[in-house]
Image (tube, rainbow, N blue to C red):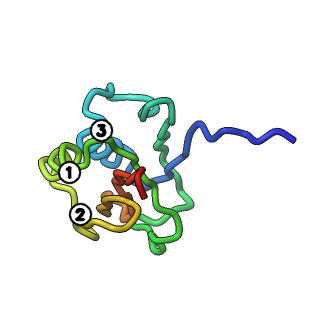
């Protein structure tokens, strides 16, 4: 049996331009103004959808995790972009975590795993 490898995620939005601008400013400042946002080979595709509300009513249903090697540097970048923190940075047994919210209300996390745990 073959196990497919995830390659992208489609994020439907009522305001795709605003959302894409936010993602590039907060997480991928080196990306161009159009097309999928490339996070190291994993693509984020943001498209207009008529079947979604302006705000996500169940944002905890799926949380996108961004694994980082330098938590402090990414946290600084996110703070400079003005992200709304849901759960400020905290140390847990598995590593350091911080949760934040995009303009559509979706939850995201940055994680620096503790590989010694």
How packed mark 2 is, by other alpha carbons closer than 10 Å (few <14, some 14-19, many 20 or more), is some
The span from disc 2 to disc 3 (Cα, nearest Å) is 21 Å
N-terminal-most mark, 1 or 2: 1
N-terminal-most mark, 3 or 1: 3
> Going 40% across and 53% down the picture, which residue do you hit?
116
Q: Which mark is residue 24?
A: 3
> Going 28% across and 70% down the picture, which residue do you hit?
86
N-terminal-most mark, 2 or 3: 3
Q: Nearer the viewer, mark 2 or mark 3?
A: 2
Residue 95 placement: quadrant:
bottom left
Q: So how many labels did they put on this image?
A: 3
Q: Secondary structure at mark 3?
A: helix
Q: Secondary structure at mark 2?
A: strand
Residue that badge 1 annotates:
75
Q: Secondary structure at mark 1?
A: helix
How packed mark 3 is, by other alpha carbons closer than 10 Å (few <14, some 14-19, many 20 or more), is some
In the rendered view of the protein, which quadrant contains the C terminus?
Answer: bottom left
The residue closer to the viewer here, 50 or 62, is: 62
Q: Which mark is residue 111?
A: none
> In the drawing, does residue 29 fall left or right of residue 105?
left
> Going 55% across and 45% down the picture, which residue do you hit?
9
Circles 1, 2 touching at the beta carbon (< 8 Å): yes
The image shows residue 53, relative to residue 35, as above or below, that is below
In the rendered view of the protein, which quadrant contains the N terminus?
Answer: top right
> Going 32% across and 63% down the picture, which residue do you hit?
99
């Amino acid at each position: 049996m073959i196990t497919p490898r995830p390659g992208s995620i489609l994020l439907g939005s009522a305001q795709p331009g605003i959302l894409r601008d936010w993602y590039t400013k907060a997480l991928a400042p080196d990306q161009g103004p159009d097309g999928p946002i490339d996070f190291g080979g994993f693509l984020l595709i943001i498209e207009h959808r008529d079947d979604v509300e302006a705000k996500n009513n169940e944002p905890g249903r799926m949380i996108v995790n961004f694994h980082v090697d330098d938590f402090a540097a990414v946290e600084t970048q996110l703070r400079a972009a003005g992200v709304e923190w849901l759960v400020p940075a905290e140390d847990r047994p598995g590593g350091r975590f911080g949760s934040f919210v995009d303009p559509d209300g979706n939850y995201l996390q940055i994680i620096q795993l503790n590989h010694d745990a």
